[in-house]
Amino acid sequence: MNERMMLMVGGVTGILFGLHPLHVESVAWVAERKDLLCALFFLLSMTVYAKYGTLADAETPHPGSESRYLKKLYLLSLGSFTLALLSKPMAVTLPVCLLMLDWYPLKRIRSFRTFRIAFVEKVPFFALSLASSILTILAQAAGGSIVPIEYAPVSTRMLVASKALVVYLGKMMVPLNLVPFYPYPSDVSLLSLDYLFSVVLVLGITMVCIVVIKGHELLLSVWGYYVVTLMPVLGIVQIGNQFMADRYVYLPSLGPFLIMGLATAWLFEKVNALQHWSRPATLVCAAAAIGVLVSLSYLTVKQIGVWQNSIDLWTYVIKKEPVRAPLAYYNRGVYYAKKGQVDRALNDFKKTTILDPSDYQAYYNLGVLYGSTGLFDMAIECFSTAIMINQSYDMAYLNRGSYYARTGRMEQARADYQKACDLGNENGCRQVKLRQS
């Protein structure tokens, strides 16, 4: 590949990465700016390691020498990886990516022996990844975010993961119907054409990359990078109630974008090779490229508008997923409640309980709103439902106790305050002491 082609590949890949609507979520949502920080240190670590790998074999007579751990470039790569992990745990896949980098394009791995040497070299990276993974899983488990295996069996998770891999690719090529929240599918079966097609396509791409590996290592390397970097968020360990998110593909998208850049450069070279039709073909290609850039820019600006405020965001999600996204109604209801728009908040929380009768927080918020409007009995009923769903919800006991007290039911109020206190609620304990004094 000549220098002009390399510049074109890099330019096209960079433009796609910078302009693509899929990346709006990571940039426009303040809470996800950690994606940008993680990507900075992730790519810095890979870049420094690539330079280290290029020089390491030439400088070190014995590939297994411990002195490699003390090389400045190695330590800089390891330090950047640490910062990437501190930015976002999704960077845990970097050690595997470095091994793939060793295989191609560095070509440091060519036998089991060289693989063993390269693997041992990555032990500090893998140790950091393991520690980060354990801490992340423990934190998510403590917050109740991890979905138990009985609710989503491994077979279901694998099918959903295959579909996510394919859907992400589709949205990179045709970035339409981007939604900030993609609900976890309810009917997952290999007999469904969607999932069967996804499994066949993923296996097919993998097999093609393996079959044509000789002389085309780049294809397998790019596909491996795409799958590996997405692995933490494919739902094998399911966290939350969504099966994909645009922000998840921020770093993984570099692989497919690189292939698009290579395809563009190859087409450009073919057009230049034409003798009689070179100029017209160049004009057509230039017009197509401008059309793609304008389209991407328009879609990106349009997608930015979705993230203007909470109302626009969750209204957009509700428009796209009116039945499968109770979380959107709940979050919009919370925003309406903060703004004092009680009627709209009530409607959204009611809709949430209809779509998801197990959402105890929606019942709790309904109770708070009913209580604020003087409908104490309805508030008590909502708090009671929340407690029925989650018997450890201290705030529901505390608030129900306060409304029992307001309506003169002091025994029931004392019982609820005591229960809230037993669950660790300080206000509940304070009320118990007041009642005893």
Image (cartoon, helix red, strand yellow):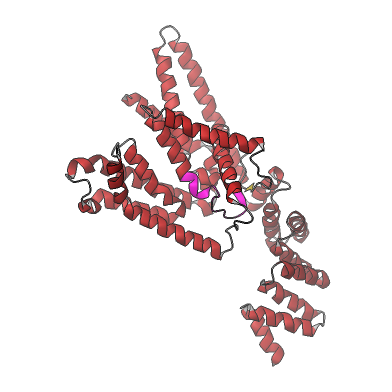
Residue 411 x, y percent position in the rendering: 78, 85
- Say whether residue 404 is magenta: no
Q: Say if residue 316 shows up in the picture.
A: yes
**Taking 359 as reference, is 9 above or below it?**
above
The quarter holding residue 265 reads: top left
Residue 147 x, y percent position in the rendering: 60, 57
In this rendering, position of residue 371 left or right of residue 92: right
Residue 269 x, y percent position in the rendering: 40, 18
Foreground: 167 or 246?
167
Foreground: 157 or 301?
157
Quadrant that contains the N terminus: top left
Residue plotted at (52% across, 32% down): 204
Q: Say if residue 297 shows up in the picture.
A: no
In this rendering, position of residue 194 left or right of residue 51: right
**Taking 429 as reference, is 304 above or below it?**
above
Query: What residue occupies the far front of the structure in this picture?
Result: 112
The quarter holding residue 150 reads: bottom right
Foreground: 278 or 224?
224
